[in-house]
Structures are given as C-alpha cells and as structure tokens.
Image (spheres, rainbow, N blue to C red):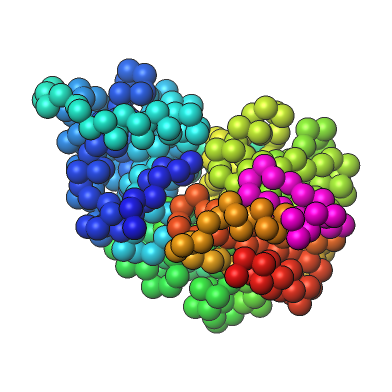
Amino acid sequence: MSIIRGISGIRGIVGETLTYEIVGIHSRAFSIIQKSGGILLARDSRSHGDELLKSAIKSLHKSGRKVLDCGIIPTPTAQFLVEKHQLAGGIVITASHNPSEWNGMKFIDSDGCFLDANKNTQLFQIADEDNFAEEFTSGEAIDFTSEVNEHIQHTINLSAIDSNKIRERKFKVVVDSVNGAASKVLPKLLSKLNCEVIPMHCELDGKFPRGAEPLPENLAELSNAVIQNGADVGFATDPDGDRLAVVDENGNPLGEEYTLTICADGFLAQNRIKQPLVTNLSTTMALDKIAEKYKTNVTRSAVGEINVVNLMKELNSPLGGEGNGGVILPESHYGRDSLVGCAMFLNRMAQTNETVSKIFESMPQFTMVKTRIQLDELNPEIAIKNIADEFYNVEQNTVDGLKLIWADRWVHIRKSNTEPIIRIYAEAPTKELALKLVDKIKSIIN
C-alpha cells in the first residue's frame, strides 16, 4: 500500500508509507505554491507527531519561511489562526480519525480553508518531481502556542450563541477528547461558559483509549461517566478536534449525524435565513426536515470538507457541515470545528428546559448504517456502474460516486478520500430498511 493522497491531504502508516522524508518533501512543495509570509505548523497528539513536525519545520526553513509553531492544537484552531493572522498557510500533522499508527498532513490555504482539488494536485506534482535545490536559508521559528486562546474567546463571542444564557444554566459536561488535540482547549472553552467540566481522556499523550472516531460503539466509557456524574451532556471529539459527537443525560449516544442537525435547529430558531444550509451527500436527511421546518432548504456537495466549504461560499450559506459530527459556521471560520459545535449545541440546550434526550426525540428520526468494503482487487468504477445499471429506475446523483434516492431513504456508494476502501452509507426510517439497502448493494458488488 502506498501513501494516500487526496482532497484531505496525505495519510499513511508511520515508518512504512509515511516517512520524515515524505513530510519534508510535501512541506517544501507546499511552501512553493503558497504566497509569501509565515506558515503555521501544528499537530495532533500522536507520539510520532513531534518528530514529523520537526521534519516539516526543517524543510520550511530550507525554503526561508517563517514558521509559527503552535505545537498540539485542534485542526480548526489552526485554520482559525491562519485566517485571523493573514498567514501564507498552515500545515497540520494529523491523520484525523485514523488509528494511532497512522499520521498525515492537512494543508491550509491562506484563507484558512483546506487546499482545493487544483492546488492539491499542483502540490502533489511538485512533491513528485522532488528536485528541490538543497539550499539552506535563514528561516525563523516563532512559538505560537498561546494564540489558541484567541480561538476560544472568539467562539464565546459568536453572535450565533447566547453565551450569557449558557452561563446561567451551569451545565454539567463530561468531555472525552480521546487524549487528542482538543484535550485542553475544549475543557477550557466549556469552563469559560460556566460549565462544570468533567474531563475524561484529556491527556495530550496520543494514546487513544478508544476507537479514534467518536462513533457510538466507541463511547461506552463516556456514556457511563455521564450517568455516574449526573451530567447534562457528554461531548466526544476525534484526535484532531474537528468532529463532535454527543451523549445525552441517560448515556445514550445520539449518533454523530445529529450533531449538525441539532445545532442547525438551534441556529434556525433564532436566525431566520433565506440562504440554504450546505452539507454533503452522505449526511442525514433529518437536516432537510429541520430546514423545511424553518422554511429554508439544504444543498449538497461532494464529500470532503473543502467541497462543502466551496459550496457554502458560492451560496453565501450561514451554516453547514458534515454528518460525521462536523459543524461549519462561517462567522467563526470555514472549517469543521468541535469548539463551535459544542458552543452551538449548548446554545440549543439553553433555548429551552428540555433535556438532551427530549431535544433528540423532537428531531426527525432516521437510522443510518455505515459500512465499508476493502478495495483490494475491486475496481470501484465498475462496481458503481453495475449498481447504477441495477437501479436504473431510481433517482441517481453522481456528483460523488453514486447516490440512490427515494422519498424516505437513500444509499450512497463512493470511494473514500482517506482510506483504500469503498464506503456504503444508507439511511431509512428503520435500521432494518437501511440494512436491506446495504445488503443489496453488497450483493451487486460481490
């Protein structure tokens, strides 16, 4: 297996497909395509991240770049700081939700957004040429770790949330940051919102005590902690802190699809808008039902944060995100952000006296099934064509793989941007119906 490169940057297994040399080469290539100015560097908490970060710093110094070293901070904090300080760009050493043996690089453009497809292609082409002159210049390194507080304070001051109303409620919150990049930042934000914070797995040691993705099956400890502490809510993030999952007061995970849905419900309740919400093709149709409730609609992009962001910009959308727990609020910055997600979720909680379980029950109810098939010798293009032929009489969307759409259910089949797999997502009013769709798709592929 080779290193994985795509719209989300690069990822690989450290020491096998991802090496210090590869990080250095891609850092130099990134410097070449970016405008003049400083480049922010950050990482998540993985044990090998420090040495990989040093490799990136060394490479950027060869390019004569000023490097602003943030150390371990959430990816959304890095995005926020790049835009706020008008930097040339940023690199985050992270493999996001991949297991601990993985690492990678996310590339942030000067506007705080990830590189688009064209700039990614340009970066990869330059990296592949690998003919950089071995010239050492006087690059400068600056400690930028304290600037994380700017992101926290900006989030508290967002007009999309009523921070005073949140403070009045004095919510008790359990936080599980999987010992990742949000381990210190998120509890600090919640404390400033007058929450009683019970941190769990909030050490920056990179030892993931559960599955890296904040999926329901990985949140048993958080669920127990919420019950044992009589907490109002539990929040869980992934290792680089851009995704947020929620557990209710009874210890029941809501499913990451409902993070954006409930945040949108709170946002639309106090902000009547004409512009559409934006999400990707794999996100729950519950979001569409919430939008209809407030007389607006949802427009969908291909999967990938930058695809959602570009469509949000095009449509001037005030809120968007992805069903993996990613909330994007342009008032903060154009990127998935667990800090913003937490603040917006607490804002929805503060709007009524309902418990989180009651809020969830008031949402449109659908069940999603997510599965995957290893590529191996499988040709994804042929597999998708066979499925399309089988369902020739069903509404089809081919913007990103293939999505088959019915009035109350859908199934989306696409090649992953970050792993050598085909993802199959299906949603329906019941789990049984969603599984039936998945089984039918698998039978065609196999």
Q: Is residue 217 above or below residue 422?
A: below
Q: Whole-percent x and y of residue 92?
A: 36, 43
Q: Whole-percent x and y of residue 446?
A: 60, 70
Residue 408 falls in image quadrant: bottom right
Left or right of 307? Residue 98 is left
Considering every residue shown, the one lying at the far top of the view is 36
Q: Is residue 214 above or below residue 345?
A: below
Residue 86 falls in image quadrant: top left
Left or right of 274? Residue 81 is left
Q: Nearer the viewer, residue 26 or 275?
A: 26
Residue at left offset 24%, top offset 36% = 25
Residue at left offset 61%, top offset 58% = 383
Q: If the image is split into quadrants, where does the N terminus sit?
A: bottom left
Residue at left offset 51%, top offset 73% = 218
Q: How many marks?
A: 0
Query: Is residue 178 visible from the viewing direction of this image?
Result: yes
Q: Whole-percent x and y of residue 407?
A: 87, 57
Q: Nearer the viewer, residue 436 or 365?
A: 436
Instruction: Please state the extent of the stretch shown in magenta in the rendering.
Output: 389-407
Magenta highlight on residue 403? yes
Magenta highlight on residue 232? no
